[in-house]
Image (cartoon, grey):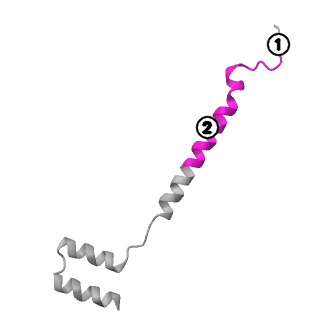
């Protein structure tokens, strides 16, 4: 059987493309995870107060009083 130098077949000739694609996918997954973890913005006291007012847990007078207390 004759062997031609450099003739490695489909898998060996294009293996580097699959390796690059593999590393691109790994990098994209890591970047997505970092963005997801790093984007956890802290909720302010005023945000919580607004949500409580929107749900009807506190009255408008109580909302205004508490908002004033938070800002001072």
Foreground label between 1 and 2: 2
Badge 1: residue crowd in 10 Å (few <14, some 14–19, many ≥20): few
Provide residue 39's location: percent of width, then percent of height. Answer: 47, 64
Reply yes or no: does residue 24 show up in magenta.
yes
Could you tell me what secondary structure mostly forms the magenta stretch?
Answer: helix
The part of the image, by quadrant, that contains residue 13 is top right
Secondary structure under the numbered disc 2 in the rendered image: helix
Question: Is residue 46 placed above or below 21 in the rendered structure?
Answer: below
Q: Which residues are magenta?
A: 3-28
Tell me what residue is drawn at x 82 percent, y 14 percent. Answer: 4
Q: Secondary structure at mark 1?
A: loop
Give the side of residue 26 with respect to residue 13, left or right. left
Image quadrant occupied by the N terminus: top right
User: Which residue does the image show at 68% across and 30% down from the upper left?
Assistant: 15
Q: What is the number of the mark on residue 38?
A: none
Between the residue at mark 1 and the residue at mark 2, the CA separation in whole angstroms equals: 30 Å
Q: Is residue 54 above or below residue 12?
A: below
Image location of residue 14, percent across then percent down: 68, 27
Looking at the image, how many numbered discs can be counted on the residues? Answer: 2
Can you identify the residue that label 1 sits on? Answer: 3
Q: Residues within 10 Å of mark 2 (few under 14, many from 20)?
A: few
Q: Quadrant of residue 21?
A: top right
Q: Quadrant of residue 52?
A: bottom left
Write down the residue under mark 2: 21
Name the outermost residue toward the top. Answer: 1
Quarter of the rendering occupied by the C terminus: bottom left
Residue sitting at x 37%, y 77%: 44
Where is residue 24? Give x, y as percent.
61, 43
């Amino acid at each position: 059987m004759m062997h031609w130098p450099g003739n490695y077949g489909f898998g060996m000739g294009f293996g580097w493309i699959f390796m690059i694609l593999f590393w691109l996918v790994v990098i994209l997954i890591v970047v997505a995870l970092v963005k997801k973890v790093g984007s956890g913005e802290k909720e302010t006291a005023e945000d919580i107060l607004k949500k409580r007012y929107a749900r009807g847990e506190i009255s408008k007078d109580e909302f205004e009083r508490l908002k004033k207390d938070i800002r001072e």
